[in-house]
Amino acid sequence: MTNGESVVKRSIFLIITFLSIFCHSIFAQNLTNQNNGIDVSIKYYNKTVYYPESSEENPIYVHITIANNGTEPFRFKLADDRMFSIDFNAFNVKNKSLPQQENLISKRTTSQTVYFREISIESGEEYSFIENLKDYIVIEDTGIYYFDLKFYPELYKNKLNFIKSNRLTLDVRPSPDIAVAMLPTNVATSAVLTPEAISPDKVIEQTIIARQRELWDQFFLYMDVEQMFTRDAARDRKYRTASADERTRMIANYKADLMLSKIDNDIVSIPERFSIERTTYFQTEGTVTVIQWFKYDTFTEKKRYEYFLRQRDGIWLIYDYRVENLGSE
């Protein structure tokens, strides 16, 4: 190879590299400019209690809004089958993604004609529609989940061009048919669990039994979760300065951490047995003391729990507790 040929090849390589970088920069800039002032938001539509059942039996309807907060008209394509216009991304508290529905995967991998409409929204206008999260995501287990949405203005085939929404917290509860009869639930009608006007000692009894049986709905039923969360001074300071949405996320994360035994282990420890020692209450304040035994391989640990309750609208709620170690047996 002559020196002249080598110089020409290097020049061509440099030109191709420059053009590639330039085009990639322009493409990224176009995406940024296109999304400027365009906001995609999601919220629950007709929110109810959600169970790990089928899409038809227990749907999770999500209200999706595309808002033009910019100064120029925003034009986009919206597929008749919304699966070609949006994606839901859902994951659990361990940040593991939930799988997509097979129907969604099949549609996107099968060659077919996608019918769509061209829509234009002026500055200050918005466009909304409703979708069922369970049509997109497989939710088989109870627990706390998080999800958001990707909107594709040029349809899914151009999936690098998307606008991401805010994130929502999803609490999927155990199906009513597995609830324990002695705890407050209406299996026959699948009614939402509601606390009853029972005495403080009964509140504690049902809460401990719920924990023994790992029924988280009943465990949190008589608990002022916000007050329990703000028992910690650092959490309280952060909570007081947070927005309403941030507070909701904090409480949801706190419940999830309790369910995973990451924090406040004393309140979620499972006793082998327990005995209510003393109950004292006045008009709005009450205290219940309980001896609890925790069995290990070679010994049994004994503790005294002192629960503090406050009455609100006739319902006693746990808002604080204290633990005293009584040794082992």
Image (spheres, grey):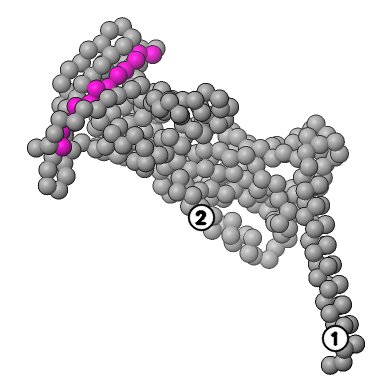
Q: Quadrant of residue 279?
A: top left
Percent x, y of residue 31: 78, 51
Look at the image and say whether residue 9 sits in the magenta stretch: no
Tell me the residue at 70%/56% (across/down): 159
Look at the image and say whether residue 308 sits in the magenta stretch: yes
Residue 142 in view in this figure: yes
Percent x, y of residue 220: 36, 30
Q: Amino acid at mark 2?
A: Pro
Residue situated in front as seen by the camera: 61 or 309: 309
Q: Quadrant of residue 68?
A: top right
Tell me the residue at 70%/46% (across/down): 163
Q: Quadrant of the C terminus?
A: top left
Percent x, y of residue 6: 85, 86
Q: For numbered disc 2, what is the local secondary structure?
A: loop
Farthest bottom residue in view = 1
Write down the region rendered in magenta: 301-312
Q: Which residue is mark 2?
A: 99
